[in-house]
Image (tube, rainbow, N blue to C red):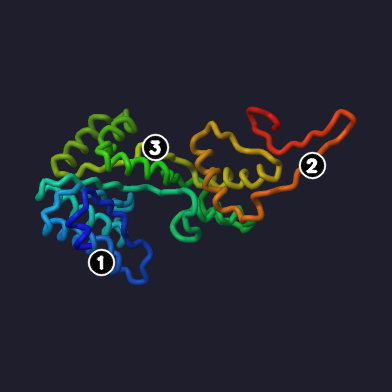
């Protein structure tokens, strides 16, 4: 780590602790390691920009949230004191291909269970999820590397048109304190129950040789995610050939907007 912090041009700090056996590991992993990283950068007099993967839970009063908040504050202080560009992202729920099920993503768990014929449990279908797709996260981070990151101020003003004055005031206070957050510009607010129903429809669609409406960006991304959880023997399926005096007809897929192929 000492060698890397001497030579790097940009730091992607994605490491963190979110499911420890001992709650004390939250602070050690999310604040302690961040401090170690920044101390080594300062020791090397390396002014490389630092990006931090934080969480929307940093606004909550729980052991995980407070440890992430402490890491944020440590980085903001470091940036202000050393005139270094810092980029703090409070990521919402990230979903995408190959995410670990039964861990910290309801989307991953639903996709895995439904693809494998297992039951799912939806405690409150009305719960709103704020979701970002992993490919959109990666695209944003590549943009950040090139100096094209998205800052929260512009996005929030768009999102809260009815309260622009208050939002601008909040953001000015954050900027004055050196605490302006970065954001992934593409996100989706969806009810938990709707996500579960949509994933369930994917399983049914494959049985009917149908594909979902790919013109909807969220549906397309969720379907790509679902496919990554299919057992290998489910990628192929038998086709029925209809033969008469005119020849043969075999349907292998159909779409809601373009009919049969």
Residue at left 75%, top 47%? 238
Q: Please, is residue 171 above or below residue 232 in the view?
A: above
Q: Earlier in the sequence, mark 1 or mark 2?
A: 1
Residue 5, can we see it?
Answer: yes
Report, in whole angstroms, how far the alpha carbon at label 3 lies from the one at label 2: 41 Å
Say which quarter of the image contains residue 163: top left
Nearest-to-viewer mark from 3 and 2: 2
Contact between labelled residues 2 and 3, with CB atoms less than 8 Å apart:
no
Where disc 2 sits, the SS reads: loop
Where disc 1 sits, the SS reads: helix
Residue at left 30%, top 51%? 53
Give the residue number, with chain letter if any, for mark 1.
Answer: 28
From the image, which quarter does the C terminus lie in? top right
Where disc 3 sits, the SS reads: loop
Q: Position of residue 100 (x, y in %)?
A: 47, 58
Q: Please, is residue 184 above or below residue 11 in the view?
A: above
Report, in whole angstroms, how far the alpha carbon at label 3 lies from the one at label 1: 32 Å
* Mark 3, other Cα within 10 Å: few <14 / some 14–19 / many ≥20: few
Residue at left 32%, top 60%? 16
Give the residue number, with chain letter if any, for mark 3.
Answer: 186
Report, in whole angstroms, how far the alpha carbon at label 1 lies from the one at label 2: 59 Å
Q: Earlier in the sequence, mark 3 or mark 2?
A: 3
Give the residue number, with chain letter if any, for mark 2.
Answer: 240
């Amino acid at each position: 780590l000492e060698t890397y912090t001497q030579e790097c041009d940009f730091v992607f700090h994605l490491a963190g602790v979110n499911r420890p056996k001992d709650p004390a590991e939250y602070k050690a992993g999310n604040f302690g390691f961040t401090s170690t990283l920044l101390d080594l950068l300062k020791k090397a007099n390396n002014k490389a920009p630092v990006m931090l993967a934080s969480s929307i839970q940093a606004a909550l009063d729980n052991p995980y949230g407070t440890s992430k908040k402490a890491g944020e504050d440590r980085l903001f202080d470091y940036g202000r004191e050393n005139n270094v560009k810092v980029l703090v992202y409070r990521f919402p729920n990230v979903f995408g291909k190959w995410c670990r099920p039964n861990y910290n993503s309801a989307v991953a768990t639903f996709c895995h269970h439904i693809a494998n014929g297992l039951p799912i449990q939806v405690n409150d279908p009305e719960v709103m999820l704020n979701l970002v797709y992993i490919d959109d996260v990666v695209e944003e981070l590549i943009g950040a590397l090139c100096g094209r990151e998205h800052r929260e101020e512009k996005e929030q003003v768009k999102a809260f048109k009815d309260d622009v004055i208050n939002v601008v005031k909040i953001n000015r206070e954050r900027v004055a304190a050196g605490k302006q957050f970065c954001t992934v510009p593409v996100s989706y607010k969806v009810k938990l129950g709707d996500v579960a129903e949509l994933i369930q429809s994917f399983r049914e669609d494959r049985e009917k040789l149908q594909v979902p409406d790919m013109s909807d960006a969220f549906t397309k991304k969720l379907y790509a995610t679902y496919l990554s959880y299919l057992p290998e023997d489910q990628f192929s399926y038998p086709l029925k050939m209809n033969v008469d005096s005119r020849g043969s007809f075999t349907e292998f897929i159909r779409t809601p907007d373009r009919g049969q192929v």
